[in-house]
Image (cartoon, helix red, strand yellow):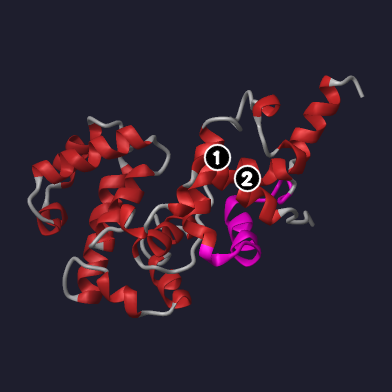
């Protein structure tokens, strides 16, 4: 099993680069957690620009979550299609809205702020299209709970640091990181990882020569040795 090493050095190095841990929680907090859950569903397998375009279009077309829930499915698909959304997301959104209303009597997840984390995750991951990553986003950014979402960027960085084996899936990596990383650094640390993965540590051509974390990165060390002809 891979060893999660140099946690302090890596987290500190990322924070020095991006500074997201210093940002207040209010920068990310949604007054209504359901809004962020739906936004996160829209973000699956697409980029932030298309996600935001779809969310804005949906909000402009429908005045409430009740209208979205009651909308004709084909109409909702058309609303979201302009942003390149897959045909499965509109149905999932309506299914989630129906489940939330049935459980809480309205279109709100605010009650989850009084629940324990295991109960929150169990409930959220019971909803259509909601896995551990999506649940952790809502936990971390809307409910004040210690969730550490692991996406493709964090999966890649974890494997390059040597924190995860190549065959480890994101949900397994997330479970390990939630145990190993300091909870108070989850929110800002997650965002720092994302920025590093989108910028320096890209999938195809990571810029190891410019990376200030290379000394603690297994992949970076191998890249340096190859460059030196070792």
Q: Position of residue 148 (x, y in %)?
A: 52, 58
Residue 153 placement: quadrant = top right
In the rendered image, residue 11 lying in the magenta stretch gets the answer: no
Callout 1 crowding tier (Cα within 10 Å): few <14, some 14–19, many ≥20: few
Residue at screen point 34% across, 62% down: 142
- Asked whether 162 or 82 is in front, the reply is 162
Secondary element at image label 2? helix
Q: Position of residue 76 (x, y in %)?
A: 17, 43
Q: Are marks 2 and 1 in contact (CB under 8 Å)?
A: yes
Look at the picture and state if 191 lies above or below 196: below
Residue at screen point 27% across, 58% down: 30
**Quadrant for the C terminus in the image:** top right
Look at the picture and state if 5 lies above or below 42: below
**Disc 1 designates what residue?**
17
The label shown at residue 13 is 2
Which residues are drawn in magenta? 163-184
Q: Is residue 85 visible?
A: no
Residue at screen point 36% across, 37% down: 48
- Asked whether 54 or 220 is in front, the reply is 220
- Asked whether 67 or 134 is in front, the reply is 134
Callout 2 crowding tier (Cα within 10 Å): few <14, some 14–19, many ≥20: some
Q: Position of residue 98 (x, y in %)?
A: 22, 64
Q: CA distance from mark 2 to mark 1?
A: 6 Å
Secondary element at image label 1? helix
């Amino acid at each position: 099993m891979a060893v999660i090493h140099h946690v302090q050095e890596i987290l500190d190095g990322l924070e020095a680069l991006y500074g997201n841990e210093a940002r207040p929680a209010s920068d990310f907090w949604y007054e209504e957690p359901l809004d962020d859950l739906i936004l996160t569903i829209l973000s699956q397998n697409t980029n932030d620009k298309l996600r935001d375009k779809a969310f804005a279009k949906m909000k402009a077309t429908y005045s409430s979550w009740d209208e979205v829930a009651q909308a004709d499915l084909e109409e909702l698909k058309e609303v979201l299609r302009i942003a390149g959304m897959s045909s499965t997301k509109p149905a999932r959104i309506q299914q989630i809205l129906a489940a939330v209303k049935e459980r809480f009597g309205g279109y709100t997840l605010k009650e989850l702020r009084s629940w324990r984390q295991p109960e929150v995750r169990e409930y959220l991951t019971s909803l259509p299209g909601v896995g551990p990553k999506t649940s952790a986003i809502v936990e971390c950014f809307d409910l004040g709970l210690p969730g550490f979402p692991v996406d493709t960027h964090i999966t890649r960085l974890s494997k390059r640091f040597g924190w995860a084996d190549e065959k480890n899936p994101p949900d397994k990596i997330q479970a390990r990181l939630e145990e190993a990383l300091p909870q108070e650094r989850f929110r800002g640390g997650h965002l720092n990882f994302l920025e590093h993965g989108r910028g320096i540590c890209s999938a195809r051509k990571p810029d190891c020569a410019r990376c200030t974390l290379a000394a603690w990165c297994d992949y970076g060390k191998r890249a340096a040795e190859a460059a030196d002809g070792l």
